[in-house]
Amino acid sequence: MNESRFAIGLLFSYALALLGLICLPFLLAQIVKRKKRNDRRFPVLLALVSFVPLLVSACFVLSYALTLVNLPAGILNHAYRSPDRSLTIRTYHYTGYWYDKAKAVLVDNKSGKRKTVYYNAKDYSPKVEWMDESRVRIGRVTLNLAKGETFDYRKSGESTVLPDQNP
């Protein structure tokens, strides 16, 4: 997902959350008002207008926070081919909101498929070393690509802080 589309989605998500939060007091007022009149009908439409935007907004933000799929494109640092030339690891860094993050994308040279396999904070340009056709060392993390291993500092609870390794 490119960075501008993600920023627009995030802005839309915040607008939806704001709409939901603005409608909540009206929903509570309607519930209190109906309770005083002994009206047992629940304001369903107002409840939907209040909670659906909050739910959609939460799903968008959690989708960003929990997966490697929705990361912005970034700026290409280097590309490293595997020993058998069938795979390439491309490293990227970010500017702006993601200014201190780095990611590595695995590219299958035959099919062109891409998969983010590494995402780390405070790591501008991680060094990549291929150990063999299926194992690669990115920064301080060794991944077995044949097993589908990935590294995401948000899930591991630790980032491997490294200086720029590729001057």
Image (cartoon, helix red, strand yellow):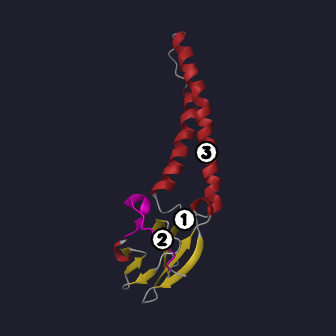
Look at the image and say whether residue 56 sits in the magenta stretch.
Answer: no
Q: Earlier in the sequence, mark 3 or mark 2?
A: 3
- Which corner quadrant of the image does residue 98 belong to? bottom right
Q: Which residues are magenta?
A: 149-165
Establish if 53 lies above or below 109.
above
Viewer-closest of 14 and 147? 14
Which quadrant of the figure contains the C terminus? bottom right
Q: Which residue is mark 1?
A: 100
| Amino acid marked by disc 3 | Tyr
Q: Earlier in the sequence, mark 1 or mark 2?
A: 1
State how far apart marks 3 and 2 are (Cα).
28 Å
Which quadrant of the figure contains the N terminus? bottom right
Q: Residue furthest front?
A: 163
Which residue is located at x 60 percent, y 47 percent?
A: 13
Establish if 162 lies above or below 19.
below
Q: Quick one: SS at disc 3?
A: helix
Badge 2 density bin: few <14, some 14–19, many ≥20, Cα 10 Å: some
Are discs 1 and 3 less than 8 Å apart at CB? no
Q: Main secondary structure of the magenta part?
A: loop
Q: Which residue is mark 3?
A: 14
Viewer-closest of 35 and 95? 95
- Which corner quadrant of the image does residue 22 belong to? top right
Tell me residue 135's x, y (percent): 36, 80
Are discs 3 and 2 less than 8 Å apart at CB? no
Tell me residue 153's x, y (percent): 42, 62
Establish if 46 lies above or below 161.
above
As drawn, the label of residue 115 is 2
Which residue is located at x 37 percent, y 70 percent?
A: 149
| Amino acid marked by disc 2 | Lys
